[in-house]
Image (cartoon, grey):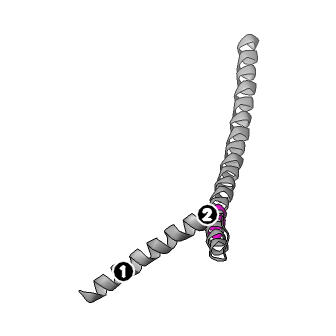
Amino acid sequence: MSVIAEIIDTLENKIEKLFAKINSLEKKSQELKIELTNAATVIQTQAQEIEALKKQYETLKLANALLGSEENKRDTKLKINSLIREIDYCIAQLSD
């Protein structure tokens, strides 16, 4: 009968260790979920910053071209032509 008691004690110890391991893993999983959420927030913020900087860069590039820079002359002409087409379209819409 003592052999069975030892087996039961061993099983109880192993089960306790498994429960402790499960609790530890659940806690770690929760920490990782929080970390993932924080990382996703940082990534989203950085993506928005990148988009804002790209727009700012394009604006600065256009302003530089308008100031007489030879580097972006073609882009400036294309942008002006595009704006003229948009204005013409608006005028045509208002005329109708």
Name the quadrant of the N terminus.
Answer: top right
Q: Position of residue 29 (x, y in %)?
A: 67, 43
Name the kind of residue labelled 2 in the image. Glu
Is 91 above or below relative to 20?
below
Query: Looking at the image, how many numbered discs can be counted on the residues?
Result: 2
Rendered image: mark on residue 51: 2
Name the quadrant of the C terminus.
Answer: bottom left
Name the kind of residue labelled 1 in the image. Asp
Q: Residue at x 52, y 70 (%)?
A: 77
The front one of 88 and 38 is 88
> Magenta residues?
50-56
As helix, strand or loop, the secondary structure at mark 1 comes to helix
Snapshot quadrant of residue 26 = top right
Q: Residue at x 76, y 16 (%)?
A: 6
Q: Position of residue 36 (x, y in %)?
A: 66, 50
Q: Residue at x 69, y 56 (%)?
A: 38
Snapshot quadrant of residue 40 = bottom right
As helix, strand or loop, the secondary structure at mark 2 comes to helix
Q: Position of residue 23 (x, y in %)?
A: 70, 40
Q: Residue furthest bottom?
A: 95
The front one of 94 and 74 is 74
Residue 34 counted in the magenta span: no
Q: Looking at the magenta stretch, what is its main secondary structure?
A: helix
Mark closer to the observer (1, 2): 1
- Residue density around tag 1, few if under 14, some if 14–19, many if 20 or more, within 10 Å: few
Q: Which badge, 1 or 2, is on the more N-terminal residue? A: 2
Is 17 above or below relative to 51?
above
Residue 83 left/right relative to 64 = left
Rendered image: mark on residue 88: 1
Q: Residue at x 62, y 76 (%)?
A: 66
The front one of 82 and 43 is 82
